[in-house]
Amino acid sequence: MTTPGAQTTLIDGLNTDLQGEFQAIIMYRLFASMVQGPYRQELRSFFAAEIPEELAHAQLLADKISALGGTPSGVPAPVTVVMDAREMLQAALDAEVETLDRYITRRTQAEAAREFGLAAELDSVIADETRHRDELRQMLARWP
């Protein structure tokens, strides 16, 4: 049986995650538009390609928050805006690492709340975020 506290903790955490996904959508959109320099086209494409996946994560979170009886947040977490391409990649990496840590915690909370379907869905989101993190790490490792 799920305790009300476990469900409330889960809803609150999912809302934090939703705010993080909104942050990522805005950050990637801004970075795709603002990136300058010799790698502009490659980085613009990379940043823009991240947006649909982050939007899908936001949809999953908002739907689950609502299904659990909560109200999805409409406010993004603060967006870090930087001008240098390398700093954009580092800001994106930092955000992905933080996001990944939150989702690992959220998966544990989903199981504690007996939301096993959500826990399974979070495995896919964790895999997505791990791929994002790894790609950003590789891009920064090659950076001149």
Image: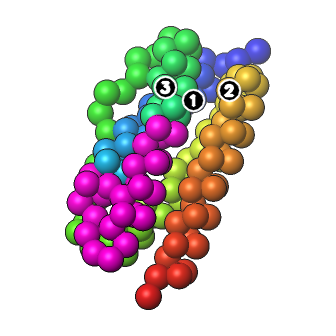
Q: Which residue is mark 3?
A: 59
Magenta highlight on residue 115: no
Looking at the picture, which amino acid does disc 3 mark?
Gln
Give the position of the N terminus as an image quadrant: top right
**Magenta extent:** 30-54
Q: Residue at x 55, y 12 (%)?
A: 67
Point out residue 141 in the picture as x, y percentages from the top left corner.
54, 81
The residue singled out by tag 1 in the image is 10
Which residue is under mark 2?
118
User: In terms of secondary structure, what is the magenta stretch mainly?
Assistant: helix
Residue type (three-letter) at the residue carrying disc 1: Leu
| Amino acid type, residue under disc 2 in the picture | Leu
User: Is 28 positioned to the left or the right of 100 in the image?
Assistant: left
> Are dots 1 and 2 in contact, CB under 8 Å?
yes
Q: Nearer the viewer, mark 1 or mark 2?
A: 2
Along the line of sight, which residue is nearer the eye, 31 or 9? Answer: 31
